[in-house]
Image (cartoon, rainbow, N blue to C red):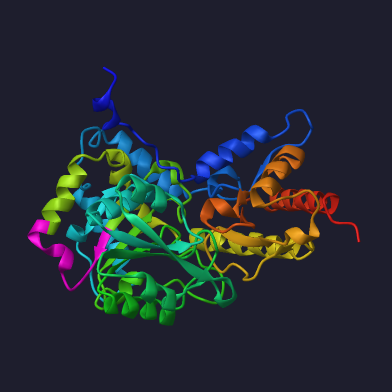
Amino acid sequence: MEGAGNANHEVEAPSRITIKGILGLLMENVETGNGKRVVSLGMGDPSAYTCFRTTRVAEDAVVDALQSQKFNGYSPTVGLPQTRRAIAEYLSRDLRYKLSSDDVFVTSGCTQAIDVALAMLARPGANVLLPRPGFPIYELCAAFRHIEVRHYDLLPNKGWEVDLDAIQTLADRNTVAMVIINPGNPCGNVYTDQHLREIAETAEKLKTLVIADEVYGHLAFGDTPFVPMGRYGRIVPVLTLGSLSKRWIVPGWRLGWFVTSDPSGMFRKPKVVERIKKYFDILGGPSTFIQAAVPQIIERTDEAFFKKNIDMLRLTADICCSRISEIPCLTCPDKPKGSMAMMVKLNLSLLEDISDDIDFCFKLAKEESVIILPGLAVGLKDWVRITFAADPPSLEEGLGRIKSFCQRYAKQV
């Protein structure tokens, strides 16, 4: 069945890079047999290190749900009622209004929530404003939905704040949303309450909504506390995306949420609600027993568990910044205040035989068995992203090897 008919049915894979894809290539480039264990500072999965473990409360909640034998069947496609209610109550703690369970839709991790948000907003000619640097899953989802991507810059010398002037020049009547990631991945920034208000006022002026990716919600360890974008839901409609993954250190449990933080009610219109519900009918959400564990997980987790993780992230971020300051060709313009990653600028003029950030990371993987992410993967050429959610000895070892690598390639004066 060759011929003209086939031409109309070609399946074209979006050419967007993915973090997992490039990390896989870097791992393949590691030189086996060099006696060096692999130190991966590329993936935001803290559960790989023993200093980051979930709470016993979460494990017990899952075991209780599973052993009850009440949650072996299908759940409602939008999520179990008690799970939706627990997430609504959890998120409402930080808001000036109360979310209801009807505002919450349970997703398979935050990645599925991203897909839902863009699927709901897709229409012919639509465009979305994405941060640069950012999280490449947004570009990938937009490509599959035929949504045009327009990038706005984050400003490294202003704590990676949103360039609000650029937003106003980029947006037009076809702009369906602007995305913010707070606390920031890949930059480690945490936005002030004032900056979030400015973002909300800008979006309202442009008559668009805000997608707030808060997968790292509450993981703030600097002097700026985490404030959810939903606090400004009365100014502009907000779609809040989040999950248990990072705060509870269970990314493999795939328990996320898509939440309409919208007290003015734009997303409560019957046709809009029906459209969202129908889309969820074709999705596979998290396992029913994982959903059933959520109320107990949220209600019973001790603040001491959260504090321990925050203290560890503060320590590992400090180690990262301290070691990077000893390497002349690397610069961190803004010390991380939250999340689990930071952006580091490469000064290639100080290095021999390194052409760009991709070359740097592939040679580093091959020669030192250290994995970090090229900045190009998150939209910023000649930078690298380093994940500091690792145990201190691994971090020290990995950064020590990076220092040796940079000394080896340093230009001789």
Q: Position of residue 351 (x, y in %)?
A: 79, 55
Task: Give the number of callouts.
Answer: 0
Q: Position of residue 398 (x, y in %)?
A: 72, 49
Residue extending furthest top? 1
Give the extent of the magenta segment.
259-271
Residue nearer the viewer, 352 or 321: 352
Residue extending furthest left? 270
Relative vertical location of residue 337 with respect to residue 278 in this rendering, above or below: below
Residue nearer the viewer, 106 or 405: 405
Residue 208: quadrant of the picture: bottom left
Residue nearer the viewer, 153 or 396: 153
Residue 168: quadrant of the picture: bottom left
Look at the image and tell me in which quarter the C terminus lies: bottom right
Residue 88: quadrant of the picture: bottom left
Residue 244 makes an appearance in the image: no
Residue under the point 27% across and 73% down: 233
Q: Position of residue 377 (x, y in %)?
A: 54, 50
Look at the image and tell me in which quarter the N terminus lies: top left
Residue nearer the viewer, 226 or 384: 384
Relative vertical location of residue 4 with respect to residue 410 in this rendering, above or below: above
Residue under the point 56% across and 41% down: 22
Residue 393 makes an appearance in the image: yes
Residue 106 part of the magenta-drawn span:
no
Residue under the point 49% across and 68% down: 153
Residue 265 part of the magenta-drawn span:
yes
